[in-house]
Amino acid sequence: MDLQKFMKSDSSTKLELIFKNLDFVSKLETEELNIILLSLEYEDRIKILRNIDFLKKSNILQKKERIIILLINLREEDKQRLLLDREFVEKDLNLDGVVIAIIIMSLEFNEIKLKMINLYFDKISRKAIGMILESCPRDTIISIIIKEEYKFSKVVIEEILSSIKVDLLVDIFIEYKEVLYEKSITIYDIIMRASEDVQLKIISKLLEIGITDKEKKGILTVLDDKQKDKLDKSIFMQEETEYKLQVSHEIGGKYGKIVVDFSKDLEIYKDLDELIYVNPMELKDEERVKIQELEEICPNIRISDDIGLSTVTLEEYKEAENWIDSILKGINTKWTNIQKVAYVDHVLGKNITYCPYLDTEIYNSEEIQNSWNLINKKMGICYGISVAEKYILSKMGIEAEVVKSKEHAFLELKNIELSQKDGEVVKGDTYLDSTWNLAINRYGGIPENFCNTYEEIRKYDIIESKGIDTETHKINENGVTLGLDKRNVREIFKSIEVTDKKGNFPLQKFMSMSNKIDAFGFPAEKAIEIQLMLLSSYCPEFAICQNETASILKGILSNIKFNRCVVNRVYEREDENKQPILYVYADLPEVGKRFYFADKETKSFVELPEKEFEQKFECYQKDLEKQNGHRPWEDIEESQEHLYKNSILEKAKNVGGR
């Protein structure tokens, strides 16, 4: 192809020729290709960017310089839209951290840059973060710390602070020390994250403005030996023995904090509270008991867990342990291990709810993904629930392992005895999915995700009507062949008095009444009203356990004839915290639209006219994005019976069991 002639063509002709001549495009020099791309009309450049197959075959994605030209010359709103779709950025465009950082730097608004840093902090380097922030004024960086709206995690804030100029960093620590402390961020965390040359600059600046002996001790503790040798020891400690003590503490673990040796005199850790995170899940029983002794010396230590995303105070940890102790007190010492597991799983299901605001703008993974927070707040997601249950079981000497698939976590019970259909007792490993048991345990049904083989647990990943395998439980190792049949599951739960003497679960009576309501043939509007009243009287806390209630609603409303039915979440417009509220929207033949919301105060479903409902409630931004900006009752789609757009169950498919 004649390049000169090609360049004189109009944009649409160029685009057509580009798509038809892959070989020509792939052989172009980078500079030539970039000139061609820039010569296209904007909409034609967008068409190239959307054609992933062409981008791959033409080698545009293989060379950073080529894709960067396309991306940084996007309009501001298109850049933002692109970056917000992380799956597209990483999986389709296969962009690395360098390219992502360049796009973020090209953004116009500083606040948007900060949001993108938060979204991609695990992809872009500390150096790149520093370069992005160089263009941001001091007030913008400070807003990261003091504005809760950004929802930056502790790790992200530490990365950002360790990336900015030393003078600004020290100024911020002096001015906002208390705010940072509330977020469990200390100067020691920043020093540990900083490069070696920056570490010494930070320390020099701190010494210049004056720091306490306690702070000097902390700094000595976190520095490696090579850096300590560069310091003037006399500035830090008056006595050589005290200096040696401070440099002898072991630093390690997930957080890079002091590893406490509970066999030593705990007085050696005095004044080092901010550098001590203790994970009780890693400790032996005799070590765990000594946490109380350590508390008297270092009252402000933080407590971590096996998840390792965040920490809690000692008081919060003790509150969680007290609740665990209350569970263990309900255990009959004569029970078999599987009876104890059944009891723990049942109690967790009765008390813990799946996080109702997952995948919204108010979700904070550090807050929810912590075992002690999960127990105290009575909500979590699959990984945290599995870790918490594993810990409780370990206190009874029952071995379990948290198993993670691509998007889910559940338990593998190890070396446990199970009765088989023929009466034989077999010892081995089996799967327990505590998260998928939440709804059925809360509402008193048979927990069918209790003690499954790998083959059984994988069956429920299949959505037969759509021919889709969600692969929720798909893992590499799948040797688990031990399970329980339904009769034995029923017998176990009968033996711990969850069922009646005949082995009937409480949910059976509820579902029987619900089926009778259907059988009476009430008009659709009346049937919904009665079904909602039945549910609220059966489970008074229904408005709090929203995911579990949504799962049950999907079952009891399924026989009512709708044009459309949506079970989802909204928040009150006047609520600054945007706490989720469950609602049911039903578009009924001949009747029209009906709206019901779960009222936590009256413990009932309240019906509102459409206009009043819209004035009172709003959808979460992320839920709107999933619906192309439409609220479910506005969505223009072909009407279908029993159509549920239930986004709060997306991360916990089949939460109610088989």
Image (cartoon, helix red, strand yellow):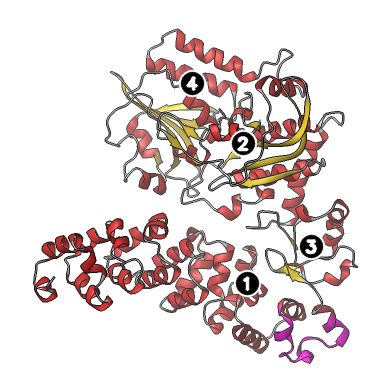
Do the residues bearing badges 1 and 4 touch, measured as CB atoms within 8 Å?
no
Q: Quadrant of the C terminus?
A: top right
Question: Mark 2 or 3, which is nearer the eye?
Answer: 2
- Residue beneath label 1, please? 177
Q: Could you tell me residue 183's position as x and y percent?
A: 62, 63
Circle on res. 556:
4
> In the image, 396: left or right of 137?
right
Label 2 is placed on what type of residue?
A: Tyr
Label 4 is placed on what type of residue?
A: Ile
Circle on res. 299:
3
Which callout, 2 or 3, points at the residue further toward the start of the chain? 3
Which callout, 4 or 3, points at the residue further toward the start of the chain? 3
Question: Mark 4 or 2, which is nearer the eye?
Answer: 2
The structure residue drawn at horizontal position 50% and vertical position 77%, both measured from the top left corner, is 127
Give the quadrant of residue 647: top left
Q: Secondary structure at mark 2?
A: helix
